[in-house]
Image: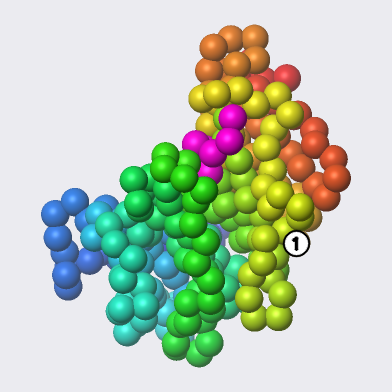
Amino acid sequence: VDWAVWKKADVWGLNESIGTSIDASTDQGFGSSVAFLDSGQYLLAGAPGEGKVYFYKKGTNGKYTSTSLTAAALSAQGVGFGTTITASDSGYFAVGNPTTSTNTGAVYIYKRTGDTVALINTFTGSGTGVSFGQSISFSKDGLWLYVGAPGAGTGGRVYAYGLNSSAFYVVGATGYIDASDSASGDNFGYSVSCSSDGAQVLIGAPYHDTGATDNGAVYIYDRSIESFIGTGSATTQT
């Protein structure tokens, strides 16, 4: 089984499994990233080893079948494309390639209309080694996108983007969030997750030192307030 879809009844049971037997290749990494688009009507699966994102559509029988969208639009950005994926319920989704251009990184934002996909915006990292796109998170309404770059700045950054009409723009004076207690090597932005309306965002810094070396930290932000909520493992977090 290369990848599986699970469905909740009274208990979790296997709904179907999906592989890439049609164009299987060594080290393609199919399933390295996955996301449901538009309330589960579509399914995306990344294969960064070959630089592709596979696109599946849900049928009337509840099963997913591949579509022609796995074509040039979703396979033209090079090896590493598909390392991360995030999707909304409004047709917008984003694909990260944190390894492109010597780990500068890039994120590609797409819009699905019917069974066609269009590239809306491309954002890239600020320099070599920042790994822009290592983590990405879309709000459910598709109006907000957060992108982690754990190698940027002092100890990592998360960039914020908003939707204006049909294009995305950088939010705020700097366009990014960084921790007030950031230190080199923290990897702030290694993980990111935003709320359904994008008003709050969780950011992980797994190598931040708080009481012990590399025990990690998690931060929560809203429009104006930063609050440190926990560090370390599940047994030592506060």
Q: Residue at x 34, y 45 (%)?
A: 102
Q: Is residue 51 left or right of residue 126?
A: left
The residue lying furthest to the right in this view is 224
Residue 28 percent location from the top left of the image: 22, 56
Residue 62 percent location from the top left of the image: 45, 77
Q: Nearer the viewer, residue 82 or 34?
A: 82
Look at the picture and state if 180 lies above or below 72.
above
Q: Residue at x 63, y 50 (%)?
A: 159
Residue 98 percent location from the top left of the image: 41, 49
Q: Residue at x 29, y 62 (%)?
A: 78
Amino acid at the residue labelled 1: Asp
Q: Nearer the viewer, residue 52 or 34?
A: 52
> Is residue 138 within the magenta segment?
no
The residue lying furthest to the bottom in this view is 114
Q: How is the image coloured?
A: rainbow
Q: Is residue 202 left or right of residue 77?
A: right
Prevailing SS of the magenta stretch: loop
Q: How many marks?
A: 1
Q: Residue at x 55, y 57 (%)?
A: 10
Q: Quadrant of residue 206?
A: top right
Label 1: element kind:
loop
The answer to whether residue 17 is visible is: no
Q: Nearer the viewer, residue 67 or 78?
A: 78
Question: Residue at label 1?
Answer: 197
Look at the picture and state if 99 lies above or below 42.
above
Q: Nearer the viewer, residue 234 or 110?
A: 110
Q: Which residues are magenta?
A: 149-154
Location of the N terminus by quadrant is bottom left
Q: Quadrant of residue 54?
A: bottom left
